[in-house]
Amino acid sequence: MAGVGHAQSLAAKRVLLIVGGGIAAYKSLDLVRRLRERGARVRVVMTAAAKEFVTPLAFVSVANEKVYDDLFSAIDEQEVGHIQLSRDADLIVVAPATAHIMARAARGLCDDLATTLLLATDKRVLYAPAMNVRMWLHPATQRNVSTLHGDGAWFVGPNVGDMACGEYGPGRMSEPLEIVEAIETALKQDTRLPAPEGLLARGGALEGLHVVVTSGPTHEPIDPVRYIANRSSGRQGHAIAVAAARAGARVTLVSGPVALSDPPGCEVIHIKSARDMLTAVEATLPADIFIAAAAVADWRIEPARDKIKKGECGAPSLSLVENPDILATVSQGLRRPRLVVGFAAETSDLIRHAQEKLARKGCDLIVANDVSEGTDVFGGATNEAHLVTRSGVEDWPRLRKEDLAERLVARLAQMIRAGATP
Ligand code: CTP
């Protein structure tokens, strides 16, 4: 009976035991018994292959609990739910951890209940590998083990010994008492995995804040039918507006002419020219955060009232006038938001130009990206950014614009919480 004659070293601890399909599965029955003797509550999940070796009923008997095995069980989902099943545990233990289950976990596959729990968990996972020697030593398995290590997993075993298949070497699952000891050691530490960057707190990381975003190109009229424009699609700016709204902010999006639909949950102001964009942005202030993602035309011309006709004097020469700098105006204005973010689209000397823009415009952060031909940033779906602040440069990998937006918003929330000031 649970608890008799043993120190309650695991009292009130909740262990989720995932049983993989290997002959060592029978040892996991004993593992459950040992854990319960020490006061732990053990919930058991079996893979389909595990049930070929040991019956669920055997685990129900030793765990004195229902055994879970079905990702799509409506009843289980209603009673516990697979996310809760994974989150309720203090530690997840996979024993036996077969080559297959580790391969799937290393790749982030979630094609059954066990692997879904491994992907959804916010706790560390302790693997007790068990497999044939050659399978254990195979470079693919070793690769998966180091991936899992890198993702924060712990390992116990495998032991060296005679295998059920007649070979000798590393691959035997650790004995139940060795696994118990590893679990005791693990549970003395913090078993929580750090929250991934971009994970937003419930209630929204930007709850209660007003965020103003500019997006898209501007069109500078030449005459009633012609204009100067650029290749900006507005995709990055719009994605930022969406991410900020999702994080709970009140979002005003000031958008140039784009082919995108208005993002849900944002107030959208449509403008055409740079001067209209500045007027619209100033009307939205005060704000807590200003993000200038628009590709504002640097120059305009005084437009002709009538359509310019082909004349005898050849091509007309356009005389350009500099547009107001919206980012600099907001950043240096009296109603400066707490956090001002600019973008730098460059084709050479990316970081140096971004640092120079940061200083010249007086903003807090520049998202710098290379828009040279072939990078597919302007108008494309992805972006490779460098975050430039006064304290340094951070290189981000190539991300979908939506993912970059989420990550940027999470970072801004962090900066606001840390009390960012100009
Ligand atoms: N920006 C702005 N108003 C302008 C020009 C730029 O608000 N008239 C903002 C952009 O939205 C972006 C940042 O300033 O956040 C930098 O834009 P970029 O085009 O890279 O730089 P420019 O200031 O235009 O300088 P240059 O074209 O010489 O690189």
Image: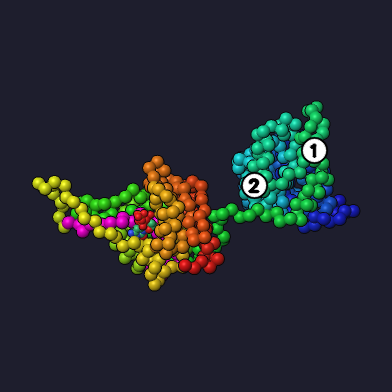
Numbered label tally:
2
Is residue 143 visible in the rendered structure shown here? yes
Per the picture, the main secondary structure of the magenta-coloured stretch is loop
Quarter residue 176 falls in: top right
Q: Is mark 1 within 8 Å of ligand 1?
A: no
Residue 301 among those drawn in magenta: yes
Q: Which residue sits at x=64%, y=47%?
A: 151
Name the residue that disc number 1 marks.
159
| Residue range (magenta) | 284-304
N-terminal label among 2 and 1: 2
Q: Nearer the viewer, residue 15 or 234?
A: 234
Q: Position of residue 356 (x, y in %)?
A: 42, 58
Q: Position of residue 325 (x, y in %)?
A: 34, 61
Amino acid marked by disc 2: Asp
Q: Nearer the viewer, residue 349 or 365?
A: 349
Image quadrant of ligand 1? Answer: bottom left
Q: Which residue sits at x=59%, y=53%?
A: 196
Q: Which residue sits at x=55%, y=58%?
A: 200
Q: Which residue sits at x=83%, y=45%?
A: 177
Q: Is mark 2 within 8 Å of ligand 1?
A: no
Amino acid marked by disc 1: Asn
Q: Position of residue 371 (x, y in %)?
A: 39, 47
Relative side of 328 to 12, left or right:
left
Q: Nearer the viewer, residue 240 or 66?
A: 240
Q: Nearer the viewer, residue 372 or 13?
A: 372
Name the residue that disc number 2 marks.
151
Is residue 237 visible in the rendered structure shown here? no
* Alpha carbon separation for disc pair 2 and 1: 23 Å
